[in-house]
Image (spheres, rainbow, N blue to C red):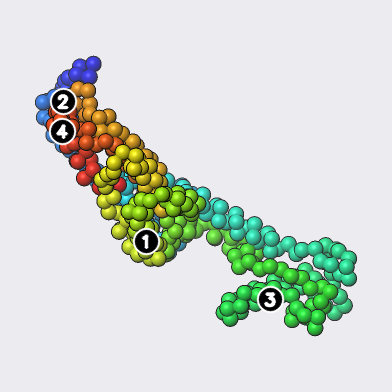
Amino acid sequence: FSQEAVRTLLTEVENNRTGLMVVLAGYKDKMSHFMRADPGLQRRFPLALHLDDYTPEELAEICENVAKSQFGKVFEEGLQAKLADHIRNYHAFEIPSNNGGLAVNLTEKAVDQLTIRIQDLSEEAADWSQPPSRSVSGASTSAPLSRAGSIPLDAAWNAAVSDGATKLAQSARSGSSSLSPRHSSGGSTTGIPSAHQVSPQPRRRGAGLARMNTGQIMDMWSVLTPEDFAIAEKPMLGNTVERQHVEAEVSALVGMESVKTYFQSIKQTIEYVERGGNPQILRTSLNMVLTGNPGTGKTTVARLLARYLRAFGVLPRAAFIEKNGLELKGQYVGQTAHTVKEAVQDALGGTLFVDEAYALVDRGGDRFSMEAVRTLLTEVENNRTN
């Protein structure tokens, strides 16, 4: 049926070559293979146009356009340049397989994070805006109290909040950690009798939001910031909980000093990046040969290494594809290359573990063995940092 479809298409295109435009689209490698399926295809489709992958700068621009057109959000000043660097450093491996889709996904996640951030601030503001129950001479009351010649207690609450915020700033400058506005029996610096004293526990963000009007809050709601895209001057890579678990497993290994030393070197490199070092040093080839006699833990170490790199943010995916060397060989001509490419694609962003790789060339190997090795070399080279 395929050949019949191609021949019929060629006939129709030839019969209507000046009155019909036909566009064939697809992945570059697969389209090249298709164009070789019939000699007439090249002649009847003489024009070709290849669309390059988007650059990080272009993806950042697409993110801003999506934020504005689909969600009504704008970028904070300078965010587009920061986002381009963030994409280059942490999402480069996703570009060939996602391109514009990556920009949409990042923007959607940022909008979700903005929603969470504003909600958190709103809850803090609500805590700030509600005075606690006060006690006067041992009697509890939630009604506003006042005294002759004094301001209402609600106003006093606001004054205490303001005073607490002022003390917070002064304490930060002086290095003191005592932020409580409780006072000695001599009285209160706010001018409110000690029986009417309140003890708010100020939180900066909540206090700021509590003083904002609706328009100011809506302005915050409409602006995406680096925080929403998980961009930080000193990023924390990976997952803290996963880090702790995998480090505990490494520490519990019996012997394996060379393995522990290698893990420590990885950790030091990551800590350097987190302190502000160039993230590009993490985008180097991680391919390795793991050797050892039977029972020394080669498979265990390979799995632990994959989890370690994932936990520390070096590998973006938790994929761990395990293959025996013989599994990469096909059963007929043309199957081997596809099998190897499929294994590599499944592992992109994660780890491909080829156990007993020497099985490919035992006793000199065969035609399928050499095809597997050559294909594996090509795929490894094309994806050396992915």
Q: Rate crowding at label 4 as few (under 14), some (14 to 19) or many (20 or more) other CA atoms within 10 Å.
A: some
Counting labels gives 4
Tell whether label 4 touches label 2 (CB within 8 Å).
Answer: no
Tell me the element at label 3: helix
Identify residue for label 2: 37
Lower sequence index among marks 1 and 3: 3
Q: In whole angstroms, how far apart are the C-alphas of marks 2 and 4?
A: 26 Å
Q: Quadrant of residue 64?
A: bottom left
| Nearer to the camera, 382 or 133 | 382
Specify the amino acid type for callout 3: Asp
Residue at point 13%, 34% (across, down)? 46
Lower sequence index among marks 2 and 3: 2
Q: In whole angstroms, how far apart are the C-alphas of marks 2 and 3?
A: 80 Å
Specify the amino acid type for callout 4: Met
Q: In whole angstroms, how far apart are the C-alphas of marks 2 and 1?
A: 53 Å
Q: Rate crowding at label 3 as few (under 14), some (14 to 19) or many (20 or more) other CA atoms within 10 Å.
A: some
Residue at point 28%, 43% (across, down)? 292
Q: In whole angstroms, how far apart are the C-alphas of marks 3 and 4?
A: 77 Å
Specify the amino acid type for callout 2: Ala
Specify the amino acid type for callout 1: Gln
Identify residue for label 3: 163
Question: Which mark is in front, 3 or 4?
Answer: 4
Lower sequence index among marks 2 and 1: 2
Question: Which mark is in front, 1 or 3?
Answer: 1
Tell whether label 3 touches label 1 (CB within 8 Å).
Answer: no
Mark identifier at residue 268: 1
Identify residue for label 4: 370
Which percent across, then down, holds residue 290? 28, 45
Residue at point 44%, 53% (across, down)? 251
Does 265 sit left or right of 138 as displayed? Answer: left
